């Protein structure tokens, strides 16, 4: 017959994501497939309304500083669609700077389903958090807390009650969390970026001198947190 059951559909979906992945990561070699990997969303550029051009500059600059520090690990910037402006900007800038594409690449997919739907092994994922470290609020924060289950909120509370802009918090994920068992994610790193949205707390009112400084700190704290896990 011509009808596909759910399993077939899932399989096809995974295949099409897989094809996109192959295009995404031309130049990858097998040796890096199981390297410790941090997947991270673009901090502050959606709900927090941070300028995309400035953010892309900071991402590439900070990745460059860390990419040469260590041999065997990967940093992956993730966004939901192929139309993502931040992914295009970062890709172009990373190519200009000749960053090793085995160590740093962009990837299209849901950060909570990178292995199950995208075939990408990531043992650590970053979250664009809020200062209360609470679930909800939409965006990647809501997606990660929902996918991880209530144990993420509990594990987060054990570490801290709030977060300052520019800081990151490493949270080990209980093995009972679906993110752990299904996706192989062992840690979530919450990151609080600078906020340019007047409807959200601590708005910087377009002060990009301060904003860029804080975003740079946020990525540095994130990458330091990742290194503290893998070494
Ligand atoms: N997978 C991958 N990337 C995603 C996903 C996902 N499931 N969902 C969103 N993105 P945002 P912010 C991308 O708004 O600007 C929350 O309410 C998205 O396309 O999540 O730092 C928190 O509670 C964008 O590129 O984070 C805070 O209050 C990136 O993730 C506030 O929003 C970040 O978008 C933080 O705002």
Image (tube, helix red, strand yellow):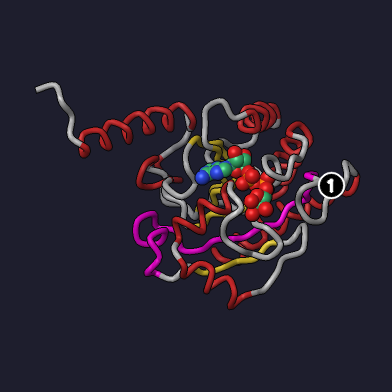
Residue 138 vs residue 1: left or right?
A: right
Residue 105 vs residue 223: left or right?
A: left
Which residue does the image show at 90% across and 44% down from the upper left? 207
Q: How far across and how far down the image is residue 170, in percent?
A: 60, 66
Dividing the picture into quadrants, the one containing residue 7 is top left
| Residue found at the very far top of the displayed protein | 2
- Magenta extent: 175-197
Q: How far across and how far down the image is residue 107, in percent?
A: 51, 36
Check the picture and name the quadrant holding the N terminus: top left
Against 79, is 187 above or below?
below
Which residue does the image show at 40% across and 62% down from the upper left? 180
Q: How far across and how far down the image is residue 191, in percent?
A: 67, 57
| Residue found at the very far front of the displayed protein | 199
Which residue does the image show at 45% across and 45% down from the upper left? 32
Tell me if I can see residue 192 in this picture: yes
Classify mark 1 as within 8 Å of ligand 1 or not, answering yes or no.
Answer: no
Against 228, is 71 above or below?
above
| Residue found at the very far left of the displayed protein | 1
Q: How far across and how far down the image is residue 159, in percent?
A: 62, 75
Which residue does the image show at 54% across and 63% down from the upper left? 230
In this figure, which residue is indicated by the disc labeled 1?
A: 211
Give the camera-side residue of 12 and 75: 12
Residue 138 vs residue 97: left or right?
A: left
How packed mark 1 is, by other alpha carbons closer than 10 Å (few <14, some 14-19, many 20 or more), is: many
Give the camera-side residue of 80 and 20: 80
Q: Based on the picture, tell me whether residue 191 belongs to the magenta stretch.
A: yes
For label 1, the SS is: helix
């Amino acid at each position: 017959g011509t009808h596909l059951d759910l399993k077939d559909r899932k399989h096809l979906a995974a295949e099409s994501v897989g094809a996109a992945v192959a295009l995404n990561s031309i130049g990858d070699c097998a040796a890096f497939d199981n390297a410790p990997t941090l997947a991270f969303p673009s901090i502050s550029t959606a709900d927090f309304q941070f300028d995309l051009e400035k953010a892309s500059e900071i991402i590439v600059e900070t990745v460059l500083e860390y990419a040469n520090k260590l041999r065997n690990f990967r940093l992956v910037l993730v966004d939901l669609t192929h139309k993502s402006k931040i992914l295009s900007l970062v890709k172009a800038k990373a190519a200009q700077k000749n960053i090793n594409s085995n160590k740093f690449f962009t990837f299209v997919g849901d950060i909570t389903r990178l292995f199950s739907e995208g075939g990408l092994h990531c043992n650590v994922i970053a979250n664009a958090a809020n200062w209360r470290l609470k679930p909800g609020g939409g965006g990647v924060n809501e997606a990660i807390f929902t996918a991880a289950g209530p144990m993420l909120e509990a594990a987060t509370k054990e570490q801290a009650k709030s977060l300052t802009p520019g800081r990151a918090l490493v949270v080990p994920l209980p093995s009972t969390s679906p993110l752990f068992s299904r996706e192989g994610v062992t840690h979530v790193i919450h990151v609080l970026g600078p906020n340019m949205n007047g409807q959200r707390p601590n708005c910087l009112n377009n002060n990009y001198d301060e904003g860029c400084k804080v975003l740079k700190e946020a990525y540095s704290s994130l990458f330091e947190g990742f290194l503290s896990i893998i070494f």
